Amino acid sequence: MKLDFGGWAVISRRTFDPKKDYRLAMAIYAVDILDNLARDGKIPGIRKNEAIELLEKISSCITKMRESAMSKHLLLTSNLFRGFNNLLSTFISRLGMNWYKVAKMKDDYVAKLLRFAIFNLRSLGNRLKKYPDDSPIGVVKISYVRILEVKKYPRNPKVKILKVTDMEMIYEVATTLDIKEKEVVLFAHTPPIKVNGFISEGIILTNENGEPIRGNEESIGQIPSEIPRNIENQLYDHVIKPLEEEFLI
């Protein structure tokens, strides 16, 4: 079922079902990413064995949440969810203050993959609360960002390299859209995407006319109150399809 808001829509399919929820499936996917990086010794600031142990406990919490029959309200207020948040906070604190900078010096792709996985887990509660249930749209964090910098990409004149901020972090994004500095646009933080050798941390989302979805200064860092109906298609190849294939959602 789609609820229309003029040119916008919120997709609502059925009531909350943990086993088929895209957000919880992505949480497992994100933990798997971190576990693989930990076993390869690519997570800075934390001992390999400690990282693996913490991630196994985090994975166990999420798996139990997915297998439960709890309503969303009960899940968000449960000891399982509280335990998940506490374990994740412990994991992040063990990384230290400069984990992203250290990782980026060694491998740009790994650093951006690490940041995606951690930030996706950290935003899980907020996405469970604010996005439609059983819709793929909430699988990643979507928020308005401010364009800090626009540069041409030497390898491809059609591609621009952007630095954008949600007022918490600065992300690097590749796009072919016509975007200028200081504009506020809607951004999806996805797993790293390789664009002509550049590692983009997500995509600038567009409306049905292919134009960037714009906001204002007050909307920076905020989730849109209404979800454009075509966002699911824009996210499909990057995040939705892999989840459907691996978790059979």
Image: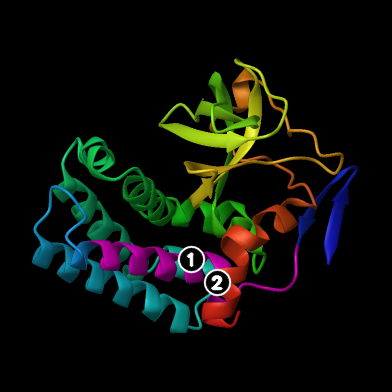
Disc 1 residue type? Met
Residue under label 1, please give it. Answer: 26
Which of the 4 quarters of the picture holds residue 157?
A: top right
Q: Nearer the viewer, residue 182 or 84?
A: 182
Mark 1 lies on a secondary structure that is helix
Query: In the image, is residue 48 above or below residue 65?
Result: above
In the shown orientation, is residue 15 left or right of residue 50? right
Crowding at mark 2 (Cα within 10 Å: few <14, some 14-19, many 20+): many
Q: Residue at x 57, y 61 (%)?
A: 239
Disc 2 residue type? Leu
In the shown orientation, is residue 141 left or right of residue 37? right
Residue 93 x, y percent position in the rendering = 18, 47
Which of the 4 quarters of the picture holds residue 63?
A: bottom left
Q: Nearer the viewer, mark 1 or mark 2?
A: 2
Magenta span:
12-37
Residue 100 x, y percent position in the rendering = 27, 40
Query: In the image, is residue 22 above or below residue 149?
Result: below
Instruction: Please report contact status of discs 1 and 2: CB closer than 8 Å, yes or no.
Output: yes
Residue under label 2, please give it. Answer: 243
Q: Which mark is residue 115?
A: none
Q: Main secondary structure of the magenta part?
A: helix
